[in-house]
């Protein structure tokens, strides 16, 4: 059981930014901002599930084979092992809160299938 994130951790990515707001042994809470026209990699996780709550803007979410639009105050649950991604097709920043739950919470638990920025 390990959460390798700590409050205040943050990073800038090609698609926007993330920051850890809180965490415990089996959970991590991040605020993620996606800049206009950008998309995260199509990915899955072996050790964590995620809950996303859109807090600003509109998101196009890929969940398995489905694509769904989520707006402010709407949420989506991503089970362990499910392929997923989020993108911002608008002209405004989009923000969401991500709550990760699982026995291992770590940036190394990302399996990328597609990535617009050449990451593997």
Image: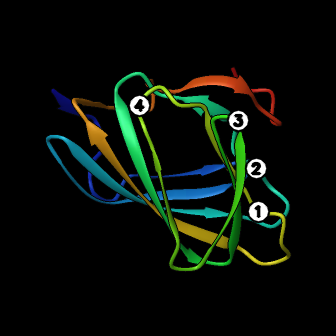
Q: Indicate whether 119 appears above or below 37.
A: above
Badge 3 local density, few (<14 within 10 Å), some, or many (20+)?
few
Res. 92 image quadrant:
bottom right
The quadrant in which the C terminus is found is: top right
Query: Badge 2: how crowded within 10 Å, few (<14), some, or many (20+)?
Result: many
Q: Which mark is residue 108?
A: none
According to the picture, the residue beneath numbered tag 4 turns out to be 80
The residue drawn where x is 85% and y is 76% is 91
Task: Find residue 89 and report its horizontal and vertical position in percent.
Answer: 84, 64
Whether residue 5 sits left or right of residue 109 in the image: it is left
Which is nearer the N-term, disc 3 or disc 2?
Answer: 2
Position of 25 relative to 119 (above/below): below
Report the residue at 44% width, 32% height from top: 107
SS for dot 2: loop
Q: CA–CA distance between discs 2 and 4?
A: 20 Å
Q: Nearer the viewer, mark 2 or mark 4?
A: 4
Residue 40, x across and y down, in percent? 69, 45
Which of the two labelled residues, at mark 1 and mark 4, occupies the earlier sequence position? 4
The answer to which of 103 and 17 lies nearer the viewer is 103
Name the residue beneath numbered marker 2. Answer: 39
The answer to the question of whether label 1 and label 4 lie on touching residues, with beta carbons closer than 8 A, is: no
The foreground one among 15 and 82 is 82
Residue 105, quarter of the rendered image: top left
> Which mark sits nearer the N-terminus, 2 or 1?
2
Asked if residue 103 is positioned above or below residue 96 in the image, the reply reads above
Estimate the spatial distance between the alpha carbons at disc 3 and disc 4, rounded to whole Å: 15 Å
CB under 8 Å between callouts 2 and 1?
yes
Mark 3–mark 4 CB contact (< 8 Å): no
**Residue 88 numbered mark, or none:** 1
What is the C-alpha distance between the residues marked 1 and 3?
Answer: 18 Å
CA gap, disc 2 to disc 1? 6 Å
């Amino acid at each position: 059981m390990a959460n390798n994130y700590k409050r205040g951790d943050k990073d800038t990515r090609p698609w926007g930014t993330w920051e850890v707001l809180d965490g415990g042994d089996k959970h991590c809470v991040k605020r993620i901002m996606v800049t206009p026209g950008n998309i995260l990699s199509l990915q899955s996780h072996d050790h964590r599930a995620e809950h996303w709550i859109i807090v600003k803007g509109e998101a196009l979410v890929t969940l398995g084979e489905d694509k769904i639009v989520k707006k402010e105050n709407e949420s989506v649950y991503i089970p362990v092992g499910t392929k997923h991604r989020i993108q911002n097709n608008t002209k405004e920043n989009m923000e969401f809160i991500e709550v990760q739950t699982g026995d291992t919470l770590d940036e190394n638990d990302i399996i990328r299938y597609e990535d617009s920025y050449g990451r593997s």
